[in-house]
Structure formats: C-alpha cells, structure tokens
Image (cartoon, rainbow, N blue to C red):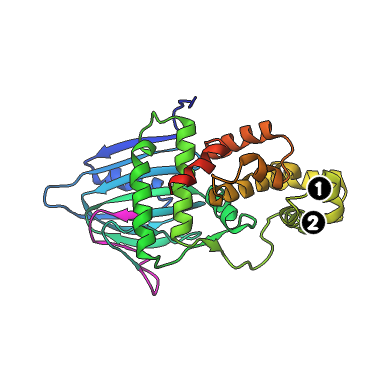
Amino acid sequence: MDSVEQPLVHVDRRGIAVDEAVAFYEDVYSSQDIHIGDPAPDGFSWRYRAVGDDHVTVGTSSVAARRWGTIDPGDDYVLAWASAPGILLDTGSSDPVDMLPGVPVMYPAGRDFAFSAAPTVQHVIRFDRTFLQSVAAARQGDLPTPLQFARHPDPAALRQLRAVVSASAGALLDPTTGRDRRSALNTTVAEAVVGTFDARPVPPTGLLSDGPATMRLAQEWMVANARRPITITDVSVAAGVAVRSLQASFRRHTGASPMHFLRQVRLHRVRAELSAADPETATVAQIAVGWGVGHLGRFSGAYAATFGEPPSATLRRRRSV
C-alpha cells in the first residue's frame, strides 16, 4: 500500500511588494543579483509554488514584471519551460537560449548564468544531481557522472516529454501524493528527460570520483564485474588495497560501503534491463539473478525503496509502451 507522507519541499508564496519578491528570488536562485523592473499593465504581483522531495521538485513561478539577473542552479539539473515568449537564458554567453512558449529547455548546469525575462509564467522541474546522474547511468551502463545535454532535442522527443510531464505534474504538485507514487513519477519524468535531451557524461578532465584512485578503481571493477558473485575481498584484491582501508575510503567519500555501491549498480542495471525487456518472455527473477542478485525478497524491497515501484511493475509497464 502506498505510504502518504508530506514532501520535504512545499512552498507557496505570493505578494505584491517588489522588495519582498527580490529577496525571495535571490534566495531561491542562490543569487545576489536579481532585479525587477517595469510591472505589467495590471500592476505588480508575484507567486512561487514548489512541491517535491529530495529527488525532484516541481515548481511554478509567476512574476508580473520585467526582471533580470543571475541564477545559480547549484547542484541541481533544471528543466524549464515558459507560458509565453520573453525569457532569455545565458544572456552573457555567445549562444543564449531563447525559451519558446511550451518548449522545455535545460538550464546551463554546474555554473551560474545571466537571464532576462518579460512578465510571464515559468514552470521548472529541479532534479537532484545524484538522482538524475543515477538514472542516466542506468540507461548508459556506466557509473553516475556529471551530465551534458543536447541543445536542440528531436521535436518528436520533446512532444513525448511534454506528454509525460503533463501526465505526472498534477500528482507531483499535490502535497498529499504518497511517497511511493511520487518516487515512481520522479523516475518516469527523469527517464524521459534523460532520453529527450540525450544526457551524456561530461568528458572527464580527471578522476570522476572525488576519492582516491584506489576507490575509483574499485568502482570501475565492480561495474565491469557486476554480473559475477563478488565479495569485499574480491574488490579489495582488484583495487590493490586492504579491505579495511577500502571500506574506510568508501565511508569517507561516499558515506556508504563498497558493497552498497555494488548493490546500487545492480539495481540500476536490473531496472534498465526490465525497462527494455519483453514482459511476455522475460521474468524479474531471470533478469535479477543474471545481475548477481542472490536473495530476491531483499532485492524486491530494495528496488521498491529506490524506484518507488516493485520490479514487476517496471516490467509490466513496458507492455503498454
């Protein structure tokens, strides 16, 4: 049964004072450079609404005035679309993004950027960086890494993304939506974004992990050998470091154990295979065992906790696609 739990984020603010709006949006955008100019003919007002959890937050922002300044997306990836023309992103670059009405775009990631906007409504979906990278990694069969996005996605893919967002937005904006339902919708929308914008790893300039080289080596070895029965001793031998040192390194830099990392890799690999499998011929057990899962009961519980639905639901859903 779906659990009902208040989301971690639930904001609904509005007002008619310019100074209040500037202070609020500077906080939302992690900026000290938000400006509000000429109001709309009916006068100035603003409203910001956002609902979500630690993976995905859906929001709507309406400002009845021209505004400009700087946005810092921080550690989030942000999908946005506008209700009317007049919003320009990355205005300080040589190739700014003109937001066409109803057409989703990705904010520049990993850096602040300048914008200007006419009075209009903007809709945003903020994805926790680690969450979206994990979804992309499952699709690509690789480790989660920083992502880059296609600047001009296929129009048909954009239409499909809009359909997915439209079907999910009502429940995601409803603070009473159950945690499990919300988690499943988060993943559905994230998978659509990753596919539409062809999310790919940013070409690395060094080690992808912030930890030592031995930890990165252990991660790569576990990814490459995830189908095999693996023990912590196997991992330590492959990385050339003592078990205790390897465990300490993972705890220090990831907050979890090496075997937790392996379980997450397997969960995402199973999900990717279930998503592509024929439900008439494939079974959850067959796919899970093929990825080294030894206890199907524990696996199903971990899968549901991670993706908000049991593995059988992922497999069945592909029947109607």
Q: Is residue 254 visible?
A: yes
Say left or right for 221 vs 26: right
**Was residue 88 drawn as part of the magenta stretch in this picture?**
yes
Q: Which residues lie in the magenta part?
A: 80-96
Cβ atoms under marks 1 and 2 closer than 8 Å = yes
Q: Nearer the viewer, residue 302 or 78?
A: 302
Q: Left or right: where does residue 223 sit relative to residue 236?
A: left
Residue drawn 45% across and 34% down?
181
Residue 8 visible in the displayed image: no
Q: What's the residue type where badge 2 is placed? A: Thr
Left or right, 263 with reference to 47: right
Q: Secondary structure at mark 1?
A: helix
Coordinates of residue 107 in the picture (x, y in percent): 41, 59
Please, what is the three-letter code of the amino acid marked with disc 1? Leu
The picture places residue 43, in percent across and down from the top left corner, at 14, 47
Of mark 1 and mark 2, the one earlier in the sequence is: 2
Disc 1 crowd rating (10 Å Cα; few below 14, some 14-19, many 20+) is many
Q: Residue at x 25, y 49 (%)?
A: 63
Residue 214: assigned label: 2
Q: Position of residue 246 (x, y in %)?
A: 81, 48
* The furthest residue to the left: 41
User: Is 47 drawn above or below residue 224 in the view shown?
Assistant: above
Task: In this rendered view, identify the residue nearer to me: 295 or 279.
Answer: 279
How many residues crowd mark 2 within 10 Å: few (<14), some (14–19), many (20+)? some
Residue under the point 46% across and 26% down: 5
**Is residue 65 found inside the magenta-colored segment of the image?**
no
Gap in Å between the C-alphas at discs 1 and 2? 8 Å
> Residue 53 at what x, y percent from top left?
47, 37
Is label 2 in a helix, a strand or a loop?
A: helix
Residue for badge 1: 246
Query: Does residue 79 sit above or below 174 in this rendering?
Result: below
- Label the magenta part by its dominant secondary structure: loop
